[in-house]
Image (cartoon, rainbow, N blue to C red):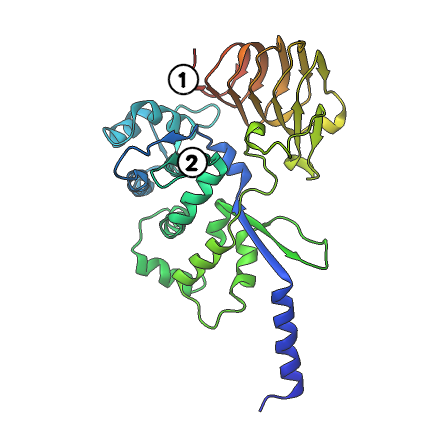
Amino acid sequence: METWKEQNKKRSQSIIIQMTNIYIWVRTARSLQFFYPIIDIREEKDDPFGIYYDICLQIIDLFKETDRISFDEFENICKEKIPEFYVEAIFQNAVEHGNLNARLKLLIFSLLFAGLQQKTENSSSDLTRPEIVLERISKYFGPIFKLLFQLDVEKRLHDRDIVHAIGNGQGYEFLDMLFEGTVKHRHSNQHGVRPLSHIIPQILEKANSISLPFLCNEIKRHLIKDPYHIDEFSNEKSNQIISTTARRTTLAHNSRRVVHLHFINRIEVLRKDEFANIHLRICNDKPKASFVFVPLRCETVFLDSLFYTKWIVLGAVQGIVIIRNCQGTRISVSFFEWIMENGYVEIRLSKYSTPYFESTI
């Protein structure tokens, strides 16, 4: 029979489990690093994710000889498998500043996200990009799990070899390349963002036996959208979330802070220190809007549905600049990566990589 102490210990563990919530999401830095406009493939019979996945495996084989690849080599691998306009965008997302060739690891991530950001026949028409990515990661989590492991060891492996390596204590750090999360205790505010490998022991602590399918299903069960809403367009939020004031700042710290600038009227100047190193989102200007000045460094910038603003002057942008549905605006900006979708703007820029345009005029 169990002693009173053993029973009390089990009861305490049960209470802790019940009072703990686990949340896992795609790392926002990865999500924005490999941002693509959603491609609607709902009329196609077959989901092309398998094509992108197979190309990823082919590139893993190249680690035997090199860690980079030229555009011509990549184009030859993708020939007649991926739309031509997409091939260059995928490649450019994997090219680092000062290089002509793409790093293989970055190229695999670029291919993976390109395969995820596609709206299939099973997708609802009103899903946002983060929701589509989450839906497809959940659907293909098993293959993605195995791909990340092979990317970490830089070689192709059979499923049984992956299971054997993990069973022998290989660890789960390879998942940190794509996922992060938090463990929230209901009676404590002491919870921060952690790599997924630090959370897995708490996911598995209540399991009687551990298998790869069980672990994948448990991680999938705790997947959510990015809680900081960094990779969302402001116009994709509900009307209740969008503020009618000029500024709304999230409570996140450091580089996870998001500042929304809505309903611009005349001149907006954001040059206080609190606006440094933020994710800036500007949308929905008014007829009298004329000038927006944000001279401090930003993490990322989204410009959406701007039709009256004459000038937007930005400082250096560490990550991506996305311009969508903007007309007649002049923009001055220094950026690393740029995507423009459905718009007509005049841009004065300093850039580090080739811009990607879709449906521009």
Query: What number is the disc on residue 106?
Result: 2
- Name which quarter of the figure residue 163 lies in: bottom left
**Separation of marks 1 and 2 at Cα, in angstroms:** 26 Å
Identified by mark 1, the residue type is Ser
Q: Which residue does the image show at 53% across and 47% down from the upper left?
A: 224
Q: Residues within 10 Å of mark 2 (few under 14, many from 20)?
A: many
Mark 1, residue position:
359
Closer to the eye: label 1 or 2: 1
| Quadrant location of the N terminus in the rendered image | bottom right
Q: Which residue does the image show at 51% across and 50% down from the upper left?
A: 223
- Horizontal and vertical percent position of residue 347: 53, 10
Q: What kind of element bears circle 1?
A: loop
Between 266 and 354, the one lying in front of the other is 266
Q: Residue furthest bottom?
A: 1
Q: Could one spot residue 243 in this view of the protein? A: yes
Q: Is residue 3 above or below residue 341?
A: below
Identified by mark 2, the residue type is Leu
Q: Could one spot residue 144 in this view of the protein? A: no
Between 261 and 104, the one lying in front of the other is 261
- Horizontal and vertical percent position of residue 188: 72, 57
Q: Is residue 189 left or right of residue 323?
A: right
Q: What kind of element bears circle 2?
A: helix
Q: Residues within 10 Å of mark 1 (few under 14, many from 20)?
A: few
Q: Earlier in the sequence, mark 1 or mark 2?
A: 2
Q: Is residue 311 above or below residue 251?
A: above
